[in-house]
Amino acid sequence: MQTAESGFTLNMGDIIFQLFSLAIPIVLIIVILFLWTSSRKKKARLDRIEAKLDKLTEKNE
């Protein structure tokens, strides 16, 4: 790919490298956010289960 007015050449390898360089931080951010939200959901679920168990043990006593 070469433009006539500036003589700038863009190699396919450069394009692929730039795409990977841009994609890696974005993917890392997405993975971190996914792990964070799933951790929060798991904690909330465990808290609900613990509250239900506490309520059941209080009824049985």
Image (cartoon, rainbow, N blue to C red):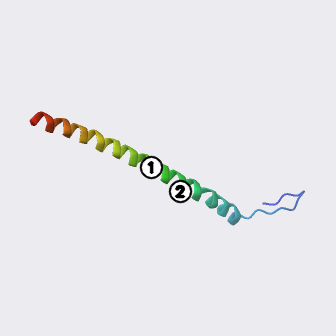
Q: Residue furthest left?
A: 61
Q: Position of residue 32 (x, y in %)?
A: 49, 53
Mark 1: secondary structure: helix
Q: Which amino acid is tagged 2?
A: Leu
Camera-nearest residue between 53 and 18: 53
Q: Mark number for residue 22?
A: none
Q: Quadrant of residue 46?
A: top left
Residue 3 is situated, as x and y percent measured from the top left of the image, at 84, 57
- Towards the viewer: 24 or 56: 56
| Residue matched to label 2 | 28
- Image position of 33 (left or right of 11): left
Which image quadrant for residue 10?
bottom right
Q: Secondary structure at mark 2?
A: helix
Give the left or right position of residue 35, taking residue 16 as reference: left
Task: Name the residue: 70% across, 64% down.
Answer: 14
**Where is residue 54 shown, x and y percent of the image?**
20, 39
In-image side of 19 versus 28 (left or right): right
Q: Nearer the viewer, residue 5 or 17?
A: 17
Give percent across and percent down for residue 55: 19, 35
Q: Residue furthest right?
A: 5
- What's under tag 1, amino acid-wise? Trp
Which one is in front, 10 or 59? 59
Q: Is residue 12 above or below residue 46?
A: below
Q: Between tags 2 and 1, which lies in front?
A: 1
Residue at coordinates 88% horizontally, 59% vertically from top-left?
A: 6
The residue singled out by tag 1 in the image is 36
